[in-house]
Each structure stands twice: as C-alpha cells, then as structure tokens.
Image (tube, grey):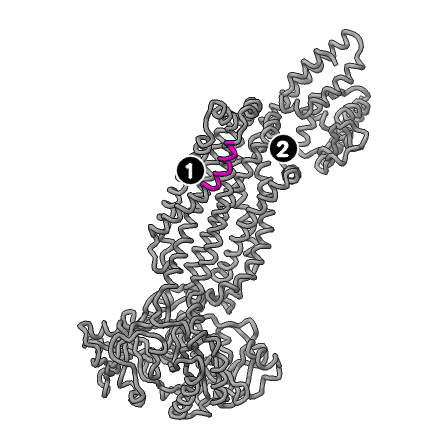
Amino acid sequence: MDRFLRFCLRGLPPGFREKYGREIELDVSEASRREAGFWRRLRLVARTLADVVSLRWMLSRAERQPFPKRKKTRTMMLEALRLDLKFASRSLGKRPGFALLGVLTLGLGIGAVTSVFSVVNGVLLRPLAYASPERIVILWHDLGNGAQSLPALHPKDLWDYRERSELFGEWTLATGNELILGDDEDPELVDVGVVEANFHSFFGVAPLYGRSFTPEENVFGGPNVAILSHRLWARRYGSDPAMVGKAIRLGGEDHQVVGILPESFRLLLPPEAFRLRDAEIWTPTQIDVASLPPRNYTGYTGFGRMRPGILLEEAQQEMEALEAQLKEENPEHQASNLQVRAVALHGDVIKRARPALRVLMAAVGFVLLIACGNTAQLLLARFRSAERELSVRAAMGASRFRLARLVVVESLLLALGGGVLGVLLARGGIALLPLFAGASVPRLEEVVLDLRVLAFALLASLAATLIFSLVPALSLSRGHLVGSLAEGGRGSASRRHVRLRNVLIVGEVALSVMLLVATGLTLRSFAALLEAEPGFRAEGLLTLRLSVSHADYPEQENRRVLFERLHDRIDALAGVASVAAVNQLPLTGSGSLQPFAYDEETARNWESVTADERFVSPGFLEVMGATLVAGREFTEDDVALGKRYAVIDEMLAEKVFPRGGALGGQVRIEPLGTEDPFAEVVGVVRHVKLHDLTKPLLPQFYFPQNWWLTTSLVVRTEEDPAAVAASVRDEIRAVAPDAAVEDLAPMTALVSRARSQARFTLVLMIGFGIFAVVLASVGLFGVISYAVSQRRVELGIRMALGATTIGIRRQVLAEGARLVAVAVVVGLAGAALSTRFLEGFLYGVQPIDPATYASVAGLLTAVALLACWVPASRATRVDPAKALRAE
Amino acid sequence: MNALHRHYILLALSARDLHGSGIARAVLEETEGELRLWPATLYGTLELMVREGLIEELEDGERPEESEKRRYYRITRLGEKALAREIERLARFVKAARQNLKRRGSEA
C-alpha cells in the first residue's frame, strides 16, 4: 500500500486504530489496487483523508451525545444492558480464577450475613404465629420497688380488667401444673396448662380434632376434660384421631380427651413466665372463687388483646388507671405498691436474645464489608490490568458513565454469583443452627429461608456491588485512562491507584480490629461466665426430678417415708457419696417467693421485699457443695417444725441484720397481725445462683423440706455422675415403680444450658472474627504485593546501588506496618466509640477493656506483618538487571 | 453519523452476516454504485451501532471458516426493529409522494 495512504491512517484515533486498523488497512490496500493511474490514486488519498477526518468528527459527536435522546427507549436500554452483561460475562469467563475468588469471597460474606439475618428475621422480625399477634400483651405485676417483677397476677385482677377495660377486646388467663400422666404402666410427668375456655381461640388456634373447652367446663366442679398437644398425641398415642372421646389418666384421675391441637401451635412466653409453660396437656381452670387466696398471691398469667388501632402506650395508660382503682379497692395491692405493666408479647419473648442478635448482625455486616473491600481490591487489580482495553474504549469515545457501567455490570455478576452461593451457604447454616444454639434462642425452629430472607440476600448482593464497584468505577476517570495510554501504565495514575487501595485496606483492617475487639470482649465475657461462682459445686452432682401421684401417696407422711427409703437405698449405692432433696433445682426457672420484712416500714408494706424460697432436706446444702458461712443446716428434728427455722443467704442476712448477729435472729415472714410471724435463723449460706449465672437476683430463704408430689433429688457422686445414673433409676423403680423420673442428668448439664446463649454468640463471633482477619490479611497481602510489583524498577536500582536484602525487606515491611498502624488506631477508636452497642451483652468485662484492646492490636499487627512478609521477601529477590531491562 | 449509511448497513446485514468490506460491497451493489462507504467512517459507524445495540459482532466460533480473521457483524432484534421502522417510513414516504405527484398530474 501507498506510503501516503498509510500516512493518512495515522490520523485514526489510537484506540480505534488498535481495534480496526488492520481491517481498514486491508480495505484501503484493496481499493488502492483497483485504482490505477496518478489522478485516481491522488483522489483515493484525498478521500481517505476526508474519511479519517469525518470519523474523528463522528466519534467526538457521539461522545458528546452517547445516546441520542430520541432513541433512549426502553428496549434500547435493555438491549444495552444485555450487551453489557454479555461483555461482562465474557470478560469474567476469560479470568476464571479472578471470578472464582470474587464469588467465593462474596459468597461467604453474603452467606454469613444471610444466615444471621434469617435468625433475626425468624426471631425478631416475623410476627408470632398467632391471630393478630401484634395486639397481644402479657401483663406484668411489679410489687414493691423491684422486689418482685413477674408476668403473674391474681385471677380476680384479670376478671376486673376484663370487666372494666375499654381498649382491650379480649382477655385470657392461664397457669401451669405438673401432673403424672398414665398409671403404673409407663408413668411420666407432663406439663399441664390450666387455661380458661377461650385460651386457645384467644391465640387463634383451632383444634386439629375435636373441640376447645366450653365455658361450662371451665366452672368450679366441672367435668375432667383435657386437650392434648400435638407432640404428646404423636409421641404417646401414635397420632390416633380416635383419642378424642377416650379417657386418659392424669394426676391419678380420669380425664376425657375433647380435642387435639395442631402441630403448629406453640405457646411462646417470656423466660420469667410463672408456672405456665408450653404444655403437653391442657385442662380448664375450674377456679373455686370462694377459696381463692388474697390478691397478692399471683399464681396466674394474664393475656389481653388490644382492640384494633389501639397503641401500646394507650393500653398502658388504661392499665395504670385500672391499677389505681384496684389499689383503692384492695388494701393488699396498696401495701405491696402494685404496678401493672402491659408488655407486647413478642418483644417479651425475645428480649434476652435481642442484644446478642443485634451484635451478631453488626458483626456479620462488618464481615460482608470486609469481603466487599477485598473484592474491590480484586476489581481494582483486574481493571488495572485491563486498563489498556478500557483506555481504548475511552479513546474511542466511550463516556466515563459507560465505562463505569461496564465495571458495575461485571461487579453485579460477581455479586449475584456470590448471592446464590451465599443463599446456599445460609441454607446449610440454618440447618446447623440448632446444634450450637440449643434452647438459648427462642423461636429458633421458626427460622427458615423465606421470601424476606431471599430478598435480603438479593439486597445484600446489590448493596455489596454498589460498595465494591463504586471505588474502581470512580477511579476510571477518562483523563486518567487516556493518561495511562500515554505513560505506558505508570506514573500519576498508578500513584492514585495505590492511594485508593491503601484507603481500602486501612478500612478493612480497621473493621476487622473492631470486630476482633467485639470477639475478644465476648470471649472474656464467656471466660468470666465460666469462672462465675454459682455458689455450689456442679461437678460430680447428679440431679433428677421425681413425681408421684396424689392417689398413690395422698399424705405428706407417705411421701416422707418414700423419700427416706429412697435416700437410704441410693446412699448405699457404690459410687454415691450422699443424697438430698429440694423442691426445685437451681437454674430451672422461677420458683415460689417468700415476702419478708426487716423494719417497720417493710412490715407495714407487706410484699414490698421478697426473697426466693427453697425447701430442702437435711444435708442438702452440703450435698450441693454450698458454703455454710455460719450456723448449721437442718436436722431431722427441724423438719417437723416447718417454717419455724430458716437458713438464709448472705444477701438476706446483710439486709435484715446489717450490723451482724444473723445467727439466732428472727426474720418476719408473715404479715402484721399474724400469729407467730417469725422464722429463726439457724444458718447463713453463701448466695446460690438460682436463676442466672451472671448475677445474684433475689435474697434466699431455705426452709425444711415440705414433701410435695414433685421433688428433685441431688446425688453427690464419687466419680462421673453419668456412671451411677442407671443404678439410681433402678433403685427408684424398685422402691416406687409408679413414680415418674424426669431430667436425670448431671448438674453440669443445667449449668451448661444456662451458658448456652453466651456460647452460641461466642462461637459465631469467633467464626466471624477469624473470617474477618483472614480476609483482611489476604487483602493486605494483595496490596503490598502490588506495591512491590509497581516498584520493581526502583527496588532494582536500589539493589544495583548496593541496598542490602535486609534493608529492602525492612522498607517493604515498614510500608505495611504504616498501613496497619493507621488501621489499628482507627479500628480501636471505632471500637471505643461503639461500646454502647455492646453493653448489656457483656458480663464481667468492661466494654473498654485494655487487655482486649492490646491483644487485638498485637494479634492483628502480627498477622498483618506476616501477610506483608511474603511480598517483602519477594521484593528482595528482584533481579536488578531484569527489572531495569523491563523498563 | 449518516442515517442513510446506517440504514444501508442494516439492510445489508438483514440478508446475511458480513464483515466490514463485505458490507461496503453489498451497499455498493445495492445502490448501484451510488453509495460508497469508506473504511474509517464505516468502522466508526459499525462501532457506534454495536454500542447502540443495533448490530453485534460475531463470537470467535461463529465466523465463517474461510474469513481471514475479520470482524463479522450480525443484525440484532433491535436493529431489525429499527429497519422495520425505516421501511414503514419509506413506504409512507413513497405512498405520499406518489399521491402528491398523481394529484399534480391530474391538475395539470
């Protein structure tokens, strides 16, 4: 081809020439072969020149107006998007390693965040599975100044509310009981829900078979009828629909089954719920109004349903007005300074899980942000290497918007891939949840991947895209790209690049510092919880619950004799050191309360101060391993005297006898005007944690054993408690074949259950912490490697000029250290600022814990420097000759 | 960016997939030598039309074997629609023009 023609083609824009130059040359040379003669050749040259000029004009005009408005139709946009997608998927397909790493990183991040969100959704967000659940409130009666706060009330109070309230449409009342189901054959102790006739319809549940109770069945002296829960029906009666109408033996009496509840019904209650539980059998209340105790005996739980459109605050105001009326009318309410609270049921059920779930959600959000940071790093590196291609497009006239869109579309593909992987991972995560969450999180069985969770995963993917693609997309300014063509890929553009990546990595490391601080604090909390002194020795202690029926053992005396025989036989077993009995074991929920008084004012305001009470057999405190600080335990002689004598805990001793002298002192345990209102203190014991391992809650009374139908036994064993469990059960069966044995397990199991929520949180936090550190280290590794590769020439020159290996390595490490130092400072500051978030979630450790902060800083610095070490030693292997030649 | 050029390119590609000089040749034939597309503007127009989604480049595996590694183009659905709109416009144009001329003829 002609030299002239070639010269003309020089005028093509560089990017355009790179793409089409070869073909244009082919066409032009073909044309020139056909044009013979000087003039015709001259005309060809002129035309080609004009062609090139008009191309430049055309491209510049297209750039000013990339899409003529007239044609910006929807199909046009869709078509363009399809093309973008095609381009992006092709370009991802060309780099499977990059795509895989990106999808994997994002998938893990989105999977973690989706798993935790599915729990948040199932537990916190989804309404309870009842009829209009948002209108259901549970009533709390607070007595004294925090002496007692329980979701418990007296039936008469609820009946008054039912009669007088205008804002509530419906009320229901329930309590609970434990009774023996079956007789000699296969007796078992079951939770019985004792409920008003409207109870199940109140919660919007209709029986699967049969019917609910009728109001006639609910009156005193009504028939013995029962409704079965679905799980009892399936477990014990083989899901036989013919059970409706049959009689079952409950508490030694025949009850006719009138209905069977559907599987979906579960009664969810706050952890403090008093007596009432999600029972296996339901019976009507049949309250004998004439023999009800005074109104300060709160043995029932009351629920109300607000009328539509009523706010909780309005309902609360009405309850306060009713509370004033009740106080006016009933001196016992006046004395105990009753305060009524209407509490939304849902919030009450999940209140203990909420702080932990919030922290977990934040933590997992950080993990996703760090994953986004890493993906942004990947994209930056990827577009850095693809810069020439993009520069061509830019030079061709592609607008900045258009280029940014390419980046975003490619990111979107990555994120959606990550989203799909994340949803799959979340499915697995949800399946694994119950394994380590145990009973610590309410409603866990309601956690599923529903539409909302899927929508959340999609949203998380889109948000992730926005976050991680924005940085690289914005860095693609046209000037920068065109510059990069001219400079051959170095210079100011790459400095800018390095700065961007540095900012990103500092953010990532700072986030992982914050996350690690939270993890560290969780760990310290858990350690403190492990060391928390429960006030007894759980190791080597076997516990069980024993129930007998009223029909078999009608009198206390019968039961005392039974226990004595059991005591002697179990005590004689090999491997058993000692045995004792208590009415209720520690860490098994609220038990009965004993009001007391220590001065005139508390005596006048009866029930303004209350203590836990437990009834124990002689030797119980010793078997438990509780510490007696003064006096003695009960003897056989005390037992007959009932509440005459008491052992009290140090907390109570301090309150009643602040100046000492508790031993032999008298504590008022009956209100003014009662005969013989005092108990004599025979011993003082160190506080035993009955409710919560984290804090002592109420002062304690121990009274001599009172033989109820249900009693718990504690067996101190010489070796592993599990080893003697079977023989203990055999002894009980031999002595009392009709007694039901429940919860035969080591005491350590109860203690471990009390820690299960903390453990659940800890396991997840550690997982997230490790994940975050790994991601951040990988990111740091990438950044430092990149910096080293950019400075190969400089390093080569330095080496050529005699820089030592150590010097080079130190220089690179110092660069990493500088980034890490900034990040650690930022992260620690961020952690310190967000401590408010963690309060209420921690135990035994301050939110700003110097040891945690220091070790996190140390750990992260060490890991980060390790991540810099590899690129640093690679830097020392730069061959100066090669590096310089590459230039 | 000449609208006429674009329409002729779409017309050529509506018959079969072609490379750049194939298109130029087809247009030349179609217009009986009236319209010659010069290479630089031709490829510039093709590039813009790809960006607008009117035509698309064939993938590596889709090109005819004998082609000497040239870029081949294919009309997209959007391109076909654009072409159909142009056909309609032209049809209306021809009809109106004929009517106008006829009326003139009858008046004369």
- Residue displayed at 73% across by 23% down: A23
Percent of width and height locating residue A420: 60, 51
- The answer to whether any part of residue A82 appears in the image is no
Query: Badge 1: how crowded within 10 Å, few (<14), some, or many (20+)?
Result: some
Q: Quadrant of residue A684?
A: bottom left
Amino acid type, residue under disc 1 in the picture: Ala
Task: Establish whether labels 2 and 1 are both on one chain.
Answer: yes
In the rendering, which numbered label is found on residue A764?
none
The residues tagged by marks 2 and 1 sit, at their Cα atoms, a distance apart of 56 Å
**Mark 2 vs mark 1: in front:** 1
Report the quarter where the C terminus of chain A lies.
top right
Q: Chain of mark 1?
A: A
Label 1 sits on a secondary structure element that is helix
In this rendering, position of residue A770 left or right of residue A670: right
Residue at the far left in the pictured view: A659
Please state the extent of the stretch shown in magenta in the rendering.
A865-876
Residue A723 vs A395, above or below: the answer is: below
Q: Residue at x 51, y 45 (%)?
A: A371
- Tell me which label, 2 or 1, sits earlier in the chain: 2
The residue singled out by tag 1 in the image is: A817
Residue A742 coordinates in the image, percent (x, y): 48, 79
| Residue for badge 2 | A70
**Residue A293, placed above or below residue A461:** below
